[in-house]
């Protein structure tokens, strides 16, 4: 019997190595759900404790779950992107036209921190409602801060996610559109880099090839899209043809902060032995509550710090005057243009629903898969518009499509082989018993 008991732990170790990426992340989620069963195997080695381990593959998220997550993310953020463009690009007259001034000056909504605060508030409320109603009757609603250890990574995620978009917006004033879109196409690279350096995660060799193919494919398709060419020409007309080192520095911080957000979230979900079991809705509520507190504190405190002149003396870079009074300026803008408020609320609602799908995907799969979905979303949106309106694709765009789907297809084929190998090994272990 001693030899039979040893077979299952050996089998589990081998399968976790084989499925270290996609199914590996699923296995980490399974360990969240069956953490106690895993401990019992290690401590007691009892035959009864082996059964949950043999049932691990049943907990593996399937293709249907992935398809629902992908469709939910695409639908939510397609609407979210349309509303964001309407909010940030539509110009409104400062005052009504008159005979003396038939074309008054215009203004746009440029208050990104206020927009992020409204977004995080909506997401926190939506996440809490989902957490409350998804809790079985008679059971206590899970705490969003179950242990003290989890506070630091959650605070880190909130800070990095709150700071990422302002750095991205700021970089556009110093770099051209071509540099910006190329960098945004490479979001998978900082995620993988941070996994390797900070969390010491290792990937099979084929995964590096998949990331490289997807990154090259998205960049190639985007660069050959007519809309990109028009925006590059527009930025050149505004004398933004060059990319300053300062702009590239700001954009690099934006990409690293995005990568840090995703990898830290992934670390929390895949480490139940450190942070206890933590679900997607819990992460969503905790992150957005902390983000709302941080950005609201900034909006309220910033005018007082700015009025003393202390902040301007300490910081090495100048602060735009609009940032000092952003909250008051945003409220004044919305009161002058109430139609913008409808777009802002719709933007926040779509983002909150999209976050439900994002955090579920992150808790069940991995940050690398999530970033792959978000990076390819824009490309697939462009592709849909091409077929819907009967446009034609250039040779460069077909090359980009081939690279992306070739990389994703190769990964699916490899993982299918690994899954079959795992099932054969499991069947072999069952026969030995």
Image (cartoon, helix red, strand yellow):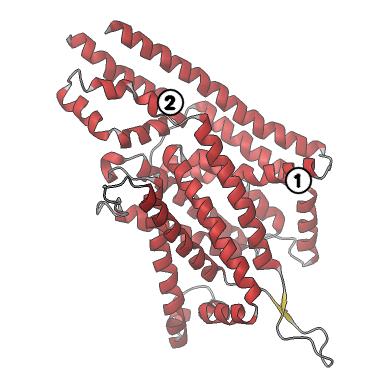
Which residue of the protein is positioned furthest toward the bottom in this rendering?
100
Q: 394 or 131: nearer the eye?
A: 131
Count the marks: how many?
2
Asked if residue 150 lies left or right of residue 72, the reply is left
For the point 43% across and 60% down, which residue is it?
A: 125
What label does residue 19 carry, if any? Answer: 2
* Nearer to us in this view, 295 or 79: 79
Which residue is at 67% across, 62% downward?
Answer: 85
Q: Secondary structure under badge 2?
A: loop
- The residue carrying mark 1 is 385
Q: Residues within 10 Å of mark 1 (few under 14, many from 20)?
A: few
Relative to 340, 298 lies left or right: left
Q: Position of residue 216 (x, y in %)?
A: 66, 39
**Residue located at (38% from left, 38% from top):** 200
Q: Nearer the viewer, residue 432 or 134?
A: 134
Q: Position of residue 363 (x, y in %)?
A: 42, 42
Quarter holding the N terminus is top left
The vertical placement of 84 against 334, above or below, is above
Quarter of the image where one finds residue 399: top right
Along the line of sight, which residue is nearer the eye, 208 or 224?
224
Q: Name the side, left or right, on which 368 lies relative to 87.
A: left
87 over 362 or under it: above or below = below
Q: Residue furthest left?
A: 44
Q: Secondary structure at mark 1?
A: helix
Up the image or down, 273 lies above or below 181; here it is above
Residue at 64% x, 51% y is 78
- Residue 244 in view: no
* Quarter of the image where the C terminus is located: top left
Mark 2 vs 1, N-terminal side: 2
Residue 174 visible within the image: yes
Q: CA distance from mark 2 to mark 1?
A: 36 Å
């Amino acid at each position: 019997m001693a030899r039979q008991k040893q077979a299952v732990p050996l089998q589990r170790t081998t399968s976790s190595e084989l499925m270290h990426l996609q199914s590996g992340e699923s296995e980490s989620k399974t360990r969240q759900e069956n953490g106690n069963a895993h401990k019992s195997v290690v401590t007691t080695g009892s035959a009864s404790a082996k059964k949950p381990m043999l049932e691990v593959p049943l907990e593996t998220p399937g293709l249907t779950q992935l398809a629902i997550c992908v469709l939910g993310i695409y639908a939510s953020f397609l609407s979210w992107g349309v509303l964001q463009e309407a909010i940030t690009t539509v110009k409104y007259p400062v005052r009504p036209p008159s005979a003396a001034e038939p074309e008054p000056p215009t203004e746009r909504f440029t208050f990104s921190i206020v927009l992020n605060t409204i977004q995080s508030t909506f997401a926190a409320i939506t996440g809490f409602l989902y957490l409350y109603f998804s809790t079985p009757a008679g059971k206590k609603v899970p705490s969003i801060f179950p242990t003290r250890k989890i506070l630091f990574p959650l605070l880190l995620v909130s800070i990095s996610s709150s700071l990422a978009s302002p750095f991205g917006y700021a970089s556009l004033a110093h770099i051209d559109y071509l540099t910006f879109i190329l960098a945004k196409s490479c979001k998978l690279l900082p995620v993988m880099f941070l996994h390797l350096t900070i969390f010491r995660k290792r990937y099979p060799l084929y995964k590096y090839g998949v990331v490289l193919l997807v990154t090259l494919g998205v960049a190639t398709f985007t660069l050959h899209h007519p809309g990109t060419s028009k925006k590059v020409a527009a930025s050149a007309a505004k004398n933004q043809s060059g990319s300053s080192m300062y702009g590239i520095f700001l954009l690099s911080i934006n990409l690293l902060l995005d990568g840090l957000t995703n990898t830290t979230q992934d670390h929390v979900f895949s480490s139940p032995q450190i942070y206890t079991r933590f679900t997607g809705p819990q992460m969503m509520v905790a992150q957005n509550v902390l983000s709302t507190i941080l950005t609201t504190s900034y909006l309220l405190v910033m005018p007082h710090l700015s009025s003393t002149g202390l902040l301007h003396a300490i910081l090495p870079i100048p602060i735009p005057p609009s940032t000092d009074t952003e909250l008051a300026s945003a409220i004044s803008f919305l009161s002058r243009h109430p139609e913008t408020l409808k777009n802002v609320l719709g933007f926040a609602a779509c983002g909150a629903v999209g976050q439900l799908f994002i955090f579920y995907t992150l808790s069940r799969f991995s940050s690398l898969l999530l970033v792959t979905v978000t990076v390819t979303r824009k490309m697939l949106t462009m592709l849909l518009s091409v077929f819907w309106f009967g446009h034609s694709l250039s040779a460069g765009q077909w090359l980009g499509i081939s690279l992306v789907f070739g990389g994703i297809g190769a990964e699916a084929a490899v993982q299918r082989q690994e899954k079959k190998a795992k099932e054969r090994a499991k069947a072999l272990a069952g026969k030995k018993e």
